[in-house]
Image: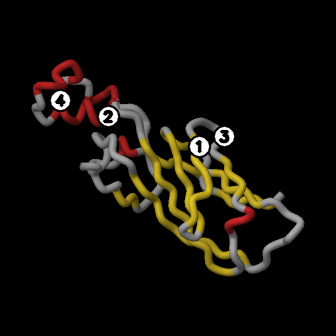
């Protein structure tokens, strides 16, 4: 069974959030942004800033692209609509923090990671997220 992705409320390093620090689950960030006029001669990009580690972007419930390394920028021109637009960013972190969490909670299968709570790696969407018009 595939776990339900975490709904993440703010951009931060998951190591700093007690609920997410030991997670290796996917997390989904949801938001809205407004575009009053769309310039037909422009290209619009979303720049996600810092992401640990992969990101999938949906604009207005349509898949736009997937990035596995920086720069985390994607052309969103063909997915925008005038006025309110929705954005979903699904972030998949590395597995290490989940392994450390399993060890911290006593799972003997992860004994190699026991006592490594100070070795957590960055995870999540850090940002800043910007819509760029070119």
- Of the two numbered discs 1 and 2 on the same chain, state the one appearing first in sequence: 1
Q: Residue 89's spot in the image, x, y percent?
A: 51, 56
Residue that badge 4 annotates: 103
- Of the two numbered discs 2 and 3 on the same chain, state the one appearing first in sequence: 3
Which quarter of the rendering shows the C terminus? bottom right
Q: Which mark is residue 71?
A: 3
Residue that badge 2 annotates: 97
Element marked by disc 1:
strand
Element marked by disc 2:
helix
Q: Is residue 88 left or right of residue 45?
A: left
- Of the two numbered discs 2 and 4 on the same chain, state the one appearing first in sequence: 2
Please identify, in this view, whether the residue under mark 1 or under mark 2 is nearer the observer: 1
Residues packed near mark 3 inside 10 Å, few (<14), some (14 to 19) or many (20 plus): few
Q: Is residue 100 left or right of residue 89?
A: left
Cβ atoms at labels 2 and 3 below 8 Å apart? no
Give the quadrant of residue 102.
top left
91 relative to 85, above or below: above
- Of the two numbered discs 3 and 4 on the same chain, state the one appearing first in sequence: 3
Element marked by disc 3:
loop
Residues packed near mark 4 inside 10 Å, few (<14), some (14 to 19) or many (20 plus): many
Marks 3 and 1 sit apart, C-alpha to C-alpha, by: 8 Å
Residue that badge 1 annotates: 67
Cβ atoms at labels 3 and 1 below 8 Å apart? yes
Marks 3 and 4 sit apart, C-alpha to C-alpha, by: 33 Å
Q: Residue 75's spot in the image, x, y percent?
A: 72, 55
Residue in the image at 58% along x and 70% along y = 60
Camera-nearest residue between 63 and 33 = 63
Residue in the image at 35% along x and 33% along y = 95
Q: Which mark is residue 54?
A: none
Marks 1 and 2 sit apart, C-alpha to C-alpha, by: 21 Å
Q: Is residue 74 left or right of residue 110?
A: right
């Amino acid at each position: 069974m595939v776990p339900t992705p975490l709904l993440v409320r703010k951009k931060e390093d998951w190591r700093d959030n007690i609920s997410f620090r030991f997670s290796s689950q996917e997390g989904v960030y949801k938001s809205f942004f407004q575009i009053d006029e769309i310039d037909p001669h422009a290209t619009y990009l979303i720049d996600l800033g810092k992401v640990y580690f992969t990101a999938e972007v949906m604009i207005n419930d349509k898949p736009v692209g997937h990035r596995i390394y920086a720069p985390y920028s994607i052309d969103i021109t063909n997915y925008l609509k005038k006025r309110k637009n929705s954005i979903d960013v699904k972030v998949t972190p590395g597995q290490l923090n989940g392994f450390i969490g399993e060890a911290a909670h006593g799972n003997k299968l992860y004994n190699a990671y026991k006592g490594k709570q100070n070795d957590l790696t960055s995870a999540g969407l850090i940002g800043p997220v910007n819509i760029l018009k070119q």
